[in-house]
Amino acid sequence: MPDRHVEAARDTAALDHTASGYTASDGRASSDPHVLARALEELPHGVLVHEGPDHRVVGANRAARTFLGDRPGILGRPLREVLPEIAGQDLLGRLDRVLSTGEPFAVREWRIEVDGHVDGDDRLVDVDVVPLRDALGAVSGVAMQFRDVTAAVRHRRSLEADTAALRERYAAAQDVVLTLQRSLLPDGLPVLPGLRIAAHYLVAGAEQAAGGDWFEAVALDGTAAVMVGDVVGRGSVAAAVMAQLRAVLVEFLLDGDDLDTVLARLDAFAGRVPGARGATVCVALVRPDGEVRYVCAGHPPPLAVSSDGAARFLPAPGGGPLGVAGPAATVGTAVLAPGDLLLCYSDGLVERPSQDLTVGLTELAEVASAAVRRGPASTMSADATDRVAELTVERMTRQGYHDDVTVLALRLTGRVVPDFATEIPAEPRRLSVLRRDLEEWLTELGVGDADIASIEIAVVEAATNSVEHAYPEGGGSVRVEGQLDGQGRICMTITDRGSWRNAPADPGHRGRGLLMMRGCMDTVEIDDSAEGTTLLLDRRLRREPVVSPATVAGTSATPRPSTMTVTLTTTAEPRIALGGPIDLSTAEDLRRELWSASRGGALPLVVDLGAVTHLGSAGIHVLYDFVEDMTADGRGLRFVVPPGSPARHAIVLSDLDRIVAVSEV
């Protein structure tokens, strides 16, 4: 048997030769080859060097020889002979490609079998392979570096397996926390003339994180009341106290008391409620003209950021926490300019372990200023208020956070959106124009997608009724007016000067327009007279706050299709994908497309309504007819209607989901 010390010396000499032969493409050594060879020998990672198409081994450092079980006589022999078990493990083919193409390759945690390995045959390695070139630049061999990561990977997988149950319990606990927080926080923020409001809330990263942070925004006849508070402690007790403070503060504000009186009443209430002593709160009343009145009871002051990014904290008016002995909170005043943004926040956003609070406040001013001036492309299409709220939370919590984090942003838009007013001829084709103009107006007001979809359905249904029923002889027009009032309500008026015919006792699938209107709006009133018919519709607008995880709550920035679109996929289960509006003007087109796609009812059909932007009662009527006919013929039929889509809302309102299979995909 060869002396292994002699074999090792030969391998080192081979590495010496290899190093001197492959140091530079121009044939000149860039460093002492003996030093390089000794360094390669001592590397903890294995290095194998091969020459020629049979991958003849010309170099192997100590780590490589050890990995191969100190096999004797490996130099000068093809790798297939040195490591016969490599056959069928896809490594030789990879080496051949590097040799033929000159392109390196790398792979991580590659499973390879090595017979007789001291730690077991089944190994996991990280491999990097690069081509070696001769003095003329031709690829004449390959160098392979590998690292045995078997132990590390097995340890990691063991930890993952051991903690799987813990992760499941943690996830379940987080779901409970998030559900609790959502139930105690406001379900929406008001949409008011001249103002934009956005809120982002992150739950602290602990299983018992149901904490005491809270926020609220309410409309006070054109004035926005925004508030952020924090209750001492966490858990269910703190959450319950938080809910009480939020509820009574809103009630005091709605009573019409001045801000001094509101805070005095809240302070007295906190003194009587166990767990409320020491709570902090910031309340700001902001008018569209920029006048601000605010109080900070033991809470950091609001941050104002101008449209050019200049940031300033409002002067702290003074006042200690609620329910404790100390100076009463006083009211401060400020004036915001058009485009300015006011940021209220909880101390969890700015507190840093072992650092003074001024460090976090300075960082907040810098981050908010940068977010106003610019942002990543993914956020620039959103309203500036949403962008600043999102980016502020994201960037201020990059190093982690230990308490609940709340950001409530309010911005003066600096412009007055005129009331909506249009008059269209009583013709089906004009409904698409009405829908487009209405959507543009609602988007400019800052109305969210869900509210836009509901208002469009109701208004277009009301106009459709006028087109169908008010002018049997043709002619005539329909007038539509809209207004956003100071309480955050959209009030719509649809008027015609015709005479509606009486509704039949059993309208069948028709006559669902009024039902859909009532499902989309808070109130629907009909005023019939000899001069015509007027429908009064109103709905309170609410924009959803973002409760962990944070995403931009945008508005409809991209115009929707103005005509119905159809895409047919012919497979074993034919699928018709519909998009755009389906109303009185496109209902008959829908009927033809459905029957064409199903080959006159001979084939089963999937009807994808995910891209439909408006589904009116005329479209519902066509879908009812199609469902009944297909069902009578025993043909399979399924509707795809994603949650939250405009079509989903109409399908549920009309009870169509009760007679046909409806899925999300």
Image (spheres, rainbow, N blue to C red):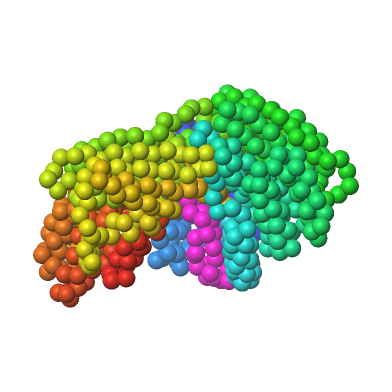
Task: Please name the residue shown 43% across and 59% down the image.
Answer: 91
Q: Quadrant of residue 568?
A: bottom left
Tally the marks: 0
Dominant secondary structure of the residues highlighted in magenta in the image: strand
**Of 637 and 491, which appears nearest the observer?**
491
Q: Quadrant of residue 165?
A: bottom right
Q: Position of residue 416 (x, y in %)?
A: 47, 29
Task: Please name the residue shown 60% across and 33% down the image.
Answer: 287
Task: Please name the residue shown 48% across and 54% down the image.
Answer: 107
Q: Quadrant of residue 56?
A: bottom left
Q: Position of residue 298 (x, y in %)?
A: 79, 43
What quarter of the picture does the C terminus occupy? bottom left
Left or right: 188, with 343 as reference point: left
Q: Position of residue 535 (x, y in %)?
A: 33, 48
**Of 194 and 139, which appears nearest the observer?**
194
What quarter of the picture does the N terminus occupy? bottom right
Q: Which residues are magenta?
A: 103-129
- Look at the image and say whether residue 110 sits in the magenta stretch: yes
- Look at the image and say whether residue 646 sits in the magenta stretch: no
Task: Please name the residue shown 32% across and 70% down the image.
Answer: 658
Q: Is residue 602 visible?
A: yes
